């Protein structure tokens, strides 16, 4: 088994994830895994970074597919005995002009952004080694969507005692409510992406709390962040940041020094803790 430190970035064949891998290849003292659901797109991305003189490794990972997540988990366990850095970056967003019915958009968006990210965490968090770092790429869209929730929902999402099961129940209810066209009446905002990212931010707060309760001595730091508005296929060419600039906050959190005791359980943008 290798003792080399290992960093993993989900959804990193393009966009911000690709830029995070590029930065980690330059700064992380160990193996950096570029992962992608499609091996062809993944290998192509690896080749691009190799042309820049960088040496990422590749593994297939589709966060919508539990088998794929578990195969990667077993690989990491066997080869490295765990992992040191996990960046949950993979995500999707329907375009504003997309005419897919809202209930479908809600189901598909939540499936990847919330449930897929959660499944990766369920399988990989137990393998994160002491002094490890976990970064969940959320969005400022989670903060604005929170503002659009009813007072009752806001209270639940800001609660310091909400459990992962309760969060899963709420995310499931959102999807069900959109199918019955009652989501607005039930206090939800009209944004599937925003609600999925509420899920990611609140999940991060819960996971950080669980680490405090169960693995305090392991000094693992786990945070959510917004990369900013970044020129990628998701956000389009008018966005203000380059992918490398968008990678800065996730990479800062992935490389927090081993003697840092924070941030932990926070939501950050531009390397600054934001209120939730
Ligand atoms: P992007 O260019 O569309 O890239 C998204 C990446 O996620 C792609 O590599 C995509 O792979 C991958 N992905 C999607 N579903 C996946 C799955 N089931 N399993 C594995 N990988 C999957 O988007 P981006 O702008 O770089 O976004 C990266 C993250 O930042 C997302 O979580 C996004 O919500 C967040 N974010 C972005 C912005 C922004 O302005 N761009 C702002 C706030 C937050 P394929 O190539 O196979 O589709």
Image (spheres, grey):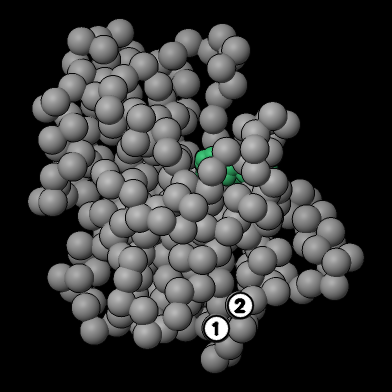
Quadrant, the C terminus = top left
Q: Eyeballing the image, is 12 above or below 130? A: above
Quadrant, the N terminus = bottom right
Question: Front-most of 22 and 274?
Answer: 274
Question: Front-most of 234 and 115?
Answer: 234
> Quadrant holding ligand 1?
top right
**Marks 1/2: CA–CA distance:** 9 Å
SS at badge 1: loop
The location of residue 156, given as percent across then percent down, is 14, 37
The residue at 18%/42% (across/down) is: 158
Disc 1 marks which residue? 5
The residue at 69%/35% (across/down) is: 233
The residue at 51%/59% (across/down) is: 250
The location of residue 97, given as percent across then percent down, is 60, 12
Question: Front-most of 62 and 152?
Answer: 152
Q: Quadrant of residue 20?
A: bottom right
The residue at 40%/22% (across/down) is: 191
Answer yes or no: disc 1 within 8 Å of ligand 1: no
Discs 1, 2 touching: Cβ within 8 Å: yes
In the figure, is residue 194 to the left or right of 252?
left
In the figure, is residue 120 to the left or right of 9?
left
Disc 2 marks which residue? 28
């Amino acid at each position: 088994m290798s003792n080399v430190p290992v960093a993993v970035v989900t959804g990193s064949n393009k966009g911000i994830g690709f830029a995070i891998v590029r930065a980690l290849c330059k700064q992380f003292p160990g193996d950096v895994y570029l992962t992608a659901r499609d091996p062809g797109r993944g290998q192509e991305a690896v080749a691009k970074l190799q042309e820049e003189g960088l040496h990422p490794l590749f593994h297939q990972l589709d966060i919508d597919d539990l088998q794929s997540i578990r195969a990667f988990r077993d690989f990491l366990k066997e080869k490295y005995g765990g992992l040191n850095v996990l960046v949950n970056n993979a995500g999707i967003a329907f375009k504003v002009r997309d005419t897919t019915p809202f209930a479908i958009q809600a189901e598909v968006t939540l499936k990847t952004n919330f449930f897929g990210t959660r499944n990766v965490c369920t399988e990989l968090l137990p393998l994160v080694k002491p002094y490890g770092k976990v970064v969940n790429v959320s969005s400022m869209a989670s903060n604005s969507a929170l503002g659009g929730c009813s007072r009752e929902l806001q209270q639940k999402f800001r609660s310091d005692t909400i459990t992962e099961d309760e969060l899963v129940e709420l995310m499931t209810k959102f999807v069900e409510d959109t199918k019955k066209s009652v989501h607005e009446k039930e206090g939800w905002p009209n944004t599937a992406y925003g609600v999925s990212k509420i899920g990611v931010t609140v999940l991060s707060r819960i996971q950080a709390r669980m680490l405090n309760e169960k693995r305090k001595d392991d000094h693992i730091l786990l945070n959510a962040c917004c990369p900013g508005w970044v020129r990628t296929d998701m956000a389009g060419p008018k966005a203000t940041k380059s992918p490398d600039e968008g990678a800065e906050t996730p990479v800062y959190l992935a490389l927090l020094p081993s003697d840092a005791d924070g941030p932990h359980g926070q939501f950050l943008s531009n390397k600054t803790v934001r209120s939730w």
